[in-house]
Every structure is written in C-alpha cells, then in structure tokens.
Image: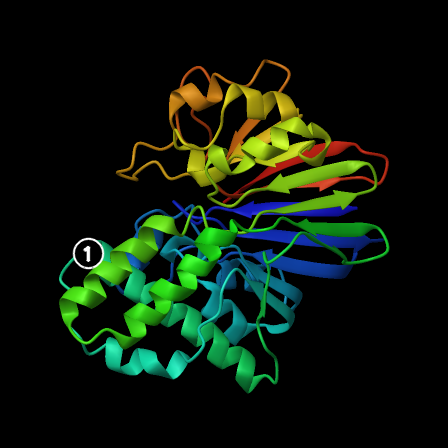
Amino acid sequence: MLKITFINVGYGDSILVEELRDSRRIFSMLIDGGAPYAGKYRASYDLWPARVPPFRYLQSHGIQSLDALFLTHFHIDHVGGMPSVMESCKFGQVWSNYVLADPGCLEGLNRMPVENPTAAEMRLSLGLLAQMQGIAKDAGKEIEVMGGRPRTIALTDQLRADFFAADPFLAARTGILAEAVLTAADSEKTRQALLQLDAIQNAAGVAIRLSYGGVRILLPADLPHSYWKSYLKEPELLRADLLKIAHHGQADSMTRELVAAIKPRHAIVSVSSDNPLGAPAPEVFAMFGPEVHLWATENIELHPYFPQTEPHGAVSFEISPDGDIAVAPELL
C-alpha cells in the first residue's frame, strides 16, 4: 500500500510518502517542510491547534528515519521546517531545486539590515537552505540538485518518481540572484536581489509525479499553470489520479485545459483559513467537475466546494496496488 499524507502546516506544503507492506514501512519520503516552528511563525501553529510542524507529526507517528527528503523550492512555507526534520530524523538522499555554492557567506548577510518584509523572509529562507546543507554535510551527505533535466528514479520495486525539468532560464536566474545576494556591497542591492529571487521561486520549482502500480500522483509544488503549457500537447505526461493543486489554489494554479489534461479522481489543496493572499480562489475549484473529489488540508469553509468539517491535522490517501484510493482526514 502507498500512503500519501498531506500534513496540515497551514499555508504551506509538507507531504509524507510511505510505502507499507504488511503494516511495515519499507520506504518513506518527506516533500517540503512547511513554515518553521520558530520566531513569528511559531504562532501560526500554536494559535491553530489543528496544525502540526512536520517534525512533530513524524515523531507522533513513530517515524525516526526517512529514506529521502525533497525540497521543491525554498520559499519559507516549503523550506521552513526541513532543518528541524533533518535534526530529529535520520535521513538518506536529499534533493532540492537549488543549493548555495557557499552557505558560509550568509553569516555576513544576516548582519546586514533589510527592512522590506518580503526581502527579510527570503533572506531567512536562504538561511534555512544553508542550514539544510550544513546538516547534510555533518551527516556525510550532499544535497543533489534536481530539475536540470527530466529524471525518473525507482524508489522501490513498485514506486517510481518522475522529476520534471525546471524552467532553465529561471533555474539559472536563481543562481545568479542568490550569488548577487551573497556578494552585494550594500543593503539596497541586497534588498533588490532578494525581492527578485522571491518573485521567481514559485516558477523555478521542481514538480514530481509518483507512480504506484497503475496510480499516478502529481505534486506540482507552487508552479504556475503557464509552466505546463507545452505539456498540454502530450497530456499523457500529466495524467494523474491524485493531484495536489499548485500554489495553494491561487488563481495562477490551474486552467480548465490543465484540469482536462490531468483528469484527476481526487484533488487536494494545502491551505490555511487565515492567510491574507486570497487563497484558495473559488474559480479554481469551479474548473473541476463533479466526478472529482475535492479535499483540503485545513477545515476551511468554501461553499459549495468545502463544507465546514472537524479540525484535522492531516489528510491521508491510502492507495492499494490494484488502484483503489481511500481517503481519511486525521482528526485531532
């Protein structure tokens, strides 16, 4: 059985992938880590009891080691909780859309004042990425950059991961801007580089599609629908039974043509009821027909798509080898 658990981290992503045989876990991977459970972000968990930091979710389910970690991109709501997971769990392979050439350069950057909140958050995100690299190095591992080309990895004899290629221009631009951040001579140049880096990160992310038996699970991170335009000519590359709606259901996440190409049976959105960004957008859910079962990581109320439900800390999809999908919100 394959179990895909979307942890309620509020506005962010953290997805646990487990293959189980006779109740024995033979493979586990965490994709993204939500926001950090620290500083001002801690309140986003503590004030909403249904939410749970990924490291704590893993601990509560007796998971002490992970075979793989995958960071789709380094916005704060994806990279934030990854260092805590790496510090609390043994881990195997680590993948990311980008790594810093010299993480030590961030020490000087952190002492430079950055007043813009978005720029300050991106600086923190780079620091968390550097922290991930440091933890991996101490464990004798290197983080492998994904997205340079399409790549397929057999995770087990039944579970396969297809990594999509990142936008080559934006991948290169990420490296240029990150280097500019680290080498900028004054705070204004640093601020501008951080803002530009923030602006492209969603579109510079790396999507992954899992295949288990005849079931496919498409996890497109925060990629905008424009990324998939060329794939609409070959819709078989997009087909998925389970879809994580990109970018928390914001308006740039989906088009009707994209929904028609993917043809999901189930679609889930990672959301928070208190975010200020207008997510999820109701018009996105109107693109899905009545044959698609819609789910949300948090108990949002958005009629007619989501009725009010009991608070839940996660939503799990249990996929059998013959293709059946059972869905179970984990109540508190």
Name the residue that disc number 1 marks. 117
Q: Is residue 107 above or below residue 241?
A: below
> Residue type at mark 1?
Pro
Percent x, y of residue 34 = 44, 54
Q: Residue placed at 47% from the left, 81% from the top?
A: 134
Q: Is residue 81 above or below residue 233?
A: below
Percent x, y of residue 196 = 29, 54
At label 1, counting other C-alpha atoms closer than 10 Å, the crowd grade (few under 14, some 14-19, many 20 or more) is few
Left or right: 90 with respect to 253? right
Percent x, y of residue 176 = 38, 65
Front residue of 141 and 179: 179
Front residue of 222 and 47: 222
Residue 64 visible to an observer of this rendering: no
Q: Residue placed at 48% from the left, 65% from the top?
A: 82
Q: Residue placed at 42% from the left, 25% from the top?
A: 308
Q: In which quarter of the image is residue 122?
A: bottom left
Front residue of 123 and 298: 123
Q: Residue placed at 48% from the left, 42% from the top?
A: 223
